């Protein structure tokens, strides 16, 4: 057994309902799990000591929505949007072509670099979706490599209809539900579909998610990013863990999300990078919806690996309180992945924690862009 004491913590945010947020605190973790939390003067001794030096400690971020495995980038699409062009899901096909042509080694190296970026920005748990392969072999390859980095892998064969099926939608949906699902199932925990304008209809997405669930995968959904297109109702109907984007949402839909306990995962990086309007988070909180914040890291609509940046947008432009933003980026992400072992620092939780060089986490919003994270323990 190896224990480590982190002491001299000015502010310790645990996200644990009983422990709450403590001042002048310390914590101990033993063999990767939190084993003691309390006032720093009462701390037990441990094998190793980390001095937080008057900084703050928060749970590591849980990023429940990324498309982190792909090749190439789409800088030109981003620049065009900054010049007034509208986001179009068709750009996904550019990344599909580059990803299909990439070797295992280059995909793995690229993903390794992305994971380093995630870690540097405090993300200690992350989900990765496929969806830039869209043929059986490439989807398997993406999920197999993603599995080397996380257990939270998601099959997104239903991202867009690939060019070779442009005149055969039905054929592609049957492939996704059939041979492709069969081949990826050993490497995927979740199944997702991009249910929106320019992607898959509610009926198509339902068919695909149900097929995945029948195969033992758990469902989640991209919904209501490009319009009020029925994704939220579908997520509620199927009792999915999370519906992601929710840029366009009605009050009735928010009430149904709250009743169903489906997490609404908001992805402000996508609105930022596509110059789209942000949803107002106050509407979600007023209705009692569980909310997560995630990066949506992908080369097309959100090439953003910084959770502090995402939280800063959420506070400044979406009316999250600082506390709501922090909880959404930690506990909210864990809820969206049905994980109880991360996103908080209660006794028994994984010792995934961040030491900040600021006396409270509110400096993320007050001093955006500064590298406040001094240690990442994961
Ligand atoms: O979450 N919405 C669908 N998929 C991604 C965009 C992917 C892309 O443009 O490459 C998203 O925003
Ligand atoms: Fe996405």
Image (cartoon, grey):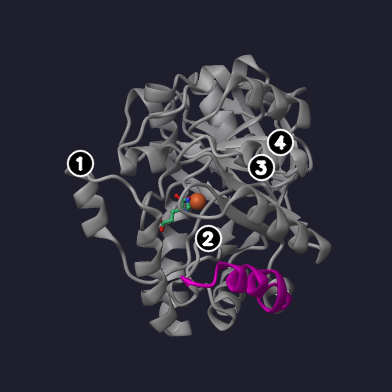
The reply to whether callout 3 and callout 4 are in contact (CB within 8 Å) is yes
User: Residue 113: horizontal and vertical position, in percent?
Assistant: 41, 66
Categorize mark 2 by other alpha carbons within 10 Å: few (<14), some (14-19), many (20+). many
Q: Is 54 part of what is drawn in magenta?
A: no
Q: Which residue is mark 2?
A: 159
Q: Earlier in the sequence, mark 3 or mark 1?
A: 1
Give the structural element (helix, strand or loop) at label 3.
Answer: strand
137 on left or right of 164 = right
Which residue has dot 3 on it? Answer: 242
Residue marked by disc 1: 84
Crowd rating for badge 1 (residues with CA inside 10 Å; few <14, some 14–19, many 20+): few
Find residue 360 and name its label: none
Q: Position of residue 291 (x, y in %)?
A: 61, 31
Residue 286, compared with residue 318, is above or below; it is: above
Q: Mark 3, residues whose alpha carbon is within 10 Å: few (<14), some, or many (≥20)? A: many
Query: Chief secondary structure of the magenta span?
Result: helix
Q: Earlier in the sequence, mark 3 or mark 4?
A: 3
The tag earlier along the polypeptide, 1 or 2, is 1
Q: Nearer the viewer, residue 225 or 284?
A: 225
Compared across the picture, whether 317 is left or right of 324 comes to: left
Q: Which residue is mark 4?
A: 262
The residue range painted magenta reads 166-182
Q: Tell me if mark 4 has few (under 14), some (14-19) or many (20+) residues whose alpha carbon lies within 10 angstroms of its own.
A: many
Residue plotted at (47% across, 22% down): 280
Q: Earlier in the sequence, mark 4 or mark 2?
A: 2
Are the residues at dot 1 and dot 4 in contact (C-beta closer than 8 Å)?
Answer: no
């Amino acid at each position: 057994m190896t224990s480590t004491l982190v002491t001299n913590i000015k502010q310790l945010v645990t996200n644990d309902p009983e422990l709450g947020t403590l001042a002048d605190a310390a914590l101990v973790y033993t063999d990767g799990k939190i084993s003691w939390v309390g006032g720093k003067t009462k701390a037990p001794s441990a094998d190793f000591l980390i001095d937080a030096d008057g900084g703050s400690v928060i749970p590591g971020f849980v990023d429940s929505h990324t498309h982190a495995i792909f090749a190439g980038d789409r800088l030109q699409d981003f620049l065009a949007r900054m010049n007034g062009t509208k986001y179009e899901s068709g750009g996904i096909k550019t990344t599909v072509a580059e990803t299909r042509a990439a070797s295992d080694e280059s995909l793995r190296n690229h993903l390794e670099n992305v994971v380093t970026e995630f870690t540097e920005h405090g993300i200690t748990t992350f989900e990765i979706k496929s969806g830039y392969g869209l043929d059986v072999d490439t989807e398997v390859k993406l999920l197999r490599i993603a599995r080397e980095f996380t257990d939270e892998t998601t099959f997104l064969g239903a991202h867009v209809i690939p060019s070779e099926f442009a005149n055969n939608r039905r054929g592609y949906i049957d492939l996704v539900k059939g041979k492709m699902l069969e081949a990826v199932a050993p490497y995927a925990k979740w199944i997702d579909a991009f249910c929106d304008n320019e992607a898959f209809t509610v009926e198509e997405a339902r068919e695909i998610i149900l097929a995945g669930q029948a195969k033992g995968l758990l469902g989640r959904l991209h919904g209501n990013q490009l319009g009020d297109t029925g994704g939220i109702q579908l997520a509620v109907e199927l009792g999915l863990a999370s519906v992601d984007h929710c840029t366009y949402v009605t009050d009735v839909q928010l009430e149904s999300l709250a009743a169903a306990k489906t997490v609404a995962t908001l992805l402000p990086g996508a609105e930022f990078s596509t110059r789209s309007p942000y949803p107002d988070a106050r509407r979600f909180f007023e209705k009692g919806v569980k909310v997560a914040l995630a990066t949506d890291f992908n080369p097309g609509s959100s090439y953003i690996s910084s959770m502090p940046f995402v939280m800063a947008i959420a506070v400044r432009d979406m009316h999250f309180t600082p506390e709501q933003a922090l909880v959404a980026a930690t506990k909210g992400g864990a809820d969206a992945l049905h994980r109880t072992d991360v996103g908080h620092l209660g006794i028994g939780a994984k010792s995934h924690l961040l030491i900040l060089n600021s006396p409270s986490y509110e400096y993320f919003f007050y001093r955006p862009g500064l590298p406040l994270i001094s240690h990442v323990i994961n």
